[in-house]
Amino acid sequence: MKSVFLRVSMIILGALLCANLIVTFLGSPSTSYAAKNFQYKVVGWRDGASEKSIETNLNQLGSQGWEVAAAVSYLVILKK
């Protein structure tokens, strides 16, 4: 009975270890992958900019293939 429990425990532990290695190496791309495949652009506006001018500027950048990655206060980070 004890050897069956030990054998099953070792099989489960081995399966979990293999799953962890697979997720670690195949689950997420490395930083160099993102650096090769994305361009980033930071766009900022001064305090008095109108919503229409900001919208027009973002629409122009969007038509060039830029996507918003993050927005913080008056800065927008775009990626392509």
Image (spheres, grey):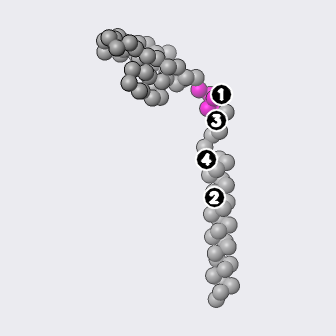
- Residue that lies at the very extreme toward the bottom in this rendered image: 1
Residue carrying label 2:
19
Residue 65 visible to the viewer: no
Principal secondary structure, stretch drawn in magenta: helix
Q: Secondary structure at mark 1?
A: helix
**Foreground of the two, 64 or 57:** 57
Q: Gap in Å between the C-alphas at discs 4 and 1?
A: 18 Å
Asked if residue 11 is positioned above or below residue 69 in the image, the reply reads below
Amino acid on which the number 1 mark rests in the picture: Lys
Percent x, y of residue 10: 67, 73
Residue 31's disc is 3
Circle nearer the viewer, 2 or 3:
3
Mark 2 to mark 4: distance in Å?
10 Å
The residue drawn where x is 52% and y is 19% is 41
In the image, residue 27 sits, relative to residue 48, either above or below, namely: below
Q: Position of residue 7 (x, y in %)?
A: 68, 78
Name the residue beneath numbered marker 1: 36
Residue drawn at the location 67% of the way across and 71% of the way down: 11
Q: Is 15 drawn above or below residue 30 in the view shown? A: below
Residue hosting label 4: 27
The quarter in which the N terminus is drawn is: bottom right
Stretch of the chain drawn in magenta? 33-38
Give the residue type at disc 4.
Gly
Q: Marks 4 and 3, how far apart in space?
A: 13 Å
